Amino acid sequence: MIHLRPRLAIAAASLLIIFATHRSVAQDSPAQQTSGTKQSAEARLKAVAKPKASGPAQDVINTLSATHRFEQAAISPDGKKVAWVEDIITKRGVSTGDTVIYVADLESKNPPKRISAAVADAIHAEGSVAWSPDSKKLAFLSDAAKAGQLQMYVMDVAGPADSAKKLTQVKGFLSTPGWSPNGKTIAVLFTENATRAAGPLVAETPATGEIKDSFFEQRLALVDLGTGKLSQISPADTYVYEYDWSPDGLRFAVTAALGNGDNNWYIAELYTLDAATGLMKSIYKPPLQIANPAWSPDGQRIAFIGGLMSDEPSVGGDIFTIAATGGEATNITPDMKASASWATWTSGGDILFGEYLEGDSALATIHPADGTKSQLFRKAGQLTAGAWGVNLSLSRDGKSSAVIRSSFSTPPEVWAGPTTEWTQITQRNKSIKPAWGEAKSLRLKNEVQAWLLYPRDFDPSKKYPLVVRVHGGPGAAVLSEWPSSSDYYSPLAGAGYFVLQPNPRGSFGEGEAFTRANVKDFGYGDFKDIMAAVDAAIDAAPIDPNRLGICGWSYGGYMTMWAVTQTNRFKAAMAGAGLSNWQSYYGENLIDQWMIPFFGKSVYDDPDVYAKSSPINFIKKVRTPTLILVGDSDGEVPAPQSYEFWHALKTLGVETQFVVYEHEGHMFSSPKHRRDVVERTLAWFDAHLR
């Protein structure tokens, strides 16, 4: 239930209102409700009512705020140039929310050149770059013509700074441009008249009056390079998620579904789409989820990733191939003890893919005919070209690539060159150092891997509190990756906590059997793995077992709510966008299709399987002080789930604080809100674990 979308797609900022338990006052703070039963609890609540980070924690926040972020890296087809998209950081170390594009020549020492549709040095939201087949032009999206409305532009990278040509004049949401093999047409995903960015991650548009199923379809469109004419070619009733041009430029391989795009990704099928006629043909209806369609160089087969996935951009599974005419799909990585997250064909007919591997990033190739696999690269850290998971931007001959690299100890930078032998291209974060301790990988006997982040200025002679941060998903994995500006766990490490991030069953990185091991078992085997990781951390480091906390967002928020109903070992908890009641959640959320593969049946057909994993049914066991955070416009995990849990804790006299953020979806867009989450979480654990 976690999603990640490019910043270009996220609208920013909203007003804040505070509501205390007995009165409401307009202030610059989110809605907040608290309860407690003892004077000491009331004193603690007062301490966290208006949190503000200071000291080491503030150093972490400043470090993360000052870190330049890269949204995309793209190598040219000839492997001689690299383009990237980066954010703008002010002199005060604050991101403006805008993005800029640069291009560097890998064969010269000339400084990078900015590519933009802007007048002079004006700054706009610009990104989603795509190289032309001849490596001379760059297509990109920009809102230079009108703030908030992206249009497609094309620019000759060797031309003057003011040579960008505006191709489109649309109203709606554009994403993912891709050139045709002959360079005469650019494909793009287009949602006409969209009222918000695509995906269930962003804040939902409030619905009033008679409620009906209404949605906007993301369609595949073609833009003629000569005339700028945009033609939508996929059917009007079908939502297209991903596409790949066939080598001859006559067809597309697409993943698509009829109806609601946010919900129906979980039942999407693999289609071929005729570029001239728009005729779509389903060639594969998968038993689970699919992603990343990729056409073979000879045009005979299509590769894709299939498996159990809980979120549209969070991909993990096995690699399959199927004839372009349809038929039976072949799993070419059966029993692989890793999770593929991206794949592409090489010119020689092998498949190169990125994978989660036991908490590491890895690259490998596989020969489809006999399944021969060769490991090319494995290391703790993140490798990405901008999409979710482990992936690259690859040159036409497959010999060169571009990536964005980071780890817990090294901030992100763009690298490019011969694959696995990249050279660092950017130096944007050379002055940034981690404001937390080192990270160590723990490996448990039951295949579970976890990352243990040490406190800043660690002293082995002291005992430290520990906070468990459970990742979202459950289809995801924690890698060694530089934290985002909104991460709340790294300030804890900066403020003197151990932070444990486990990858329990249900996570990517150990193969499909491991990913499917929590089906119809939420809160049982996965919780057992988390607690085993806690015990392993206590054995490995000087952790005070009487000062344990737990936190998480989305699935991590659910596991936090579940944990405090199952054990009293945790002395404080923070549940962000958590699920308290799977039965009521089924009828409240806007993406219920994801639940069927995990629970086996709908809640109407098998309510018991949902009931046994619902924290609310064990609520009277809770003793742990719990902070609850949620956005009021969250369509993935709606706010009533948090209300339900908070109401129960308040009624039962358990210390709690509840904060609702105005006009926020599953991922918060307002920098002020994101900072409030960080500061409030830190204050909560400081009040209960110090």
Image: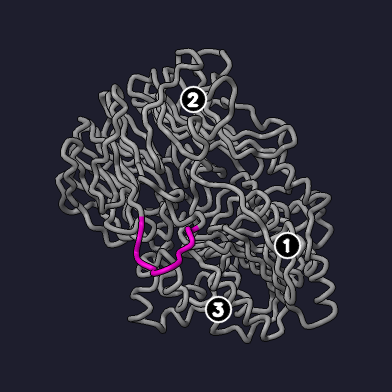
Q: Mark 3 points at which residue?
A: 615
Q: Assign a secondary structure to mark 1.
A: loop
* Residue type, label 1: Ala
Q: Assign a secondary structure to mark 3.
A: helix
Image spot of residue 88 (x, y percent)? 62, 33
The answer to whether residue 96 shows anywhere in this view is yes
* Residue type, label 3: Pro
Q: Which of marks 3 and 2 is in front?
A: 2
* Residue type, label 2: Ala
Q: Which region shows up in magenta?
A: 204-215
Image spot of residue 681 (x, y percent)? 71, 61
Q: Nearer the viewer, mark 1 or mark 3?
A: 1
Q: How crowded is mark 1: few (under 14 residues within 10 Å), some or many (20 or more)?
A: few
Q: How crowded is mark 2: few (under 14 residues within 10 Å), some or many (20 or more)?
A: many
Q: Nearer the viewer, residue 415 or 156?
A: 156
212 drawn magenta: yes
Q: Are marks 3 and 2 in contact (CB under 8 Å)?
A: no
Q: Mark 2 points at which residue?
A: 117
* Residue at horizontal 45 percent and vertical 13 percent from the top: 159
C-alpha gap between disc 3 and disc 2:
51 Å
Q: Mark 1 points at which residue?
A: 26
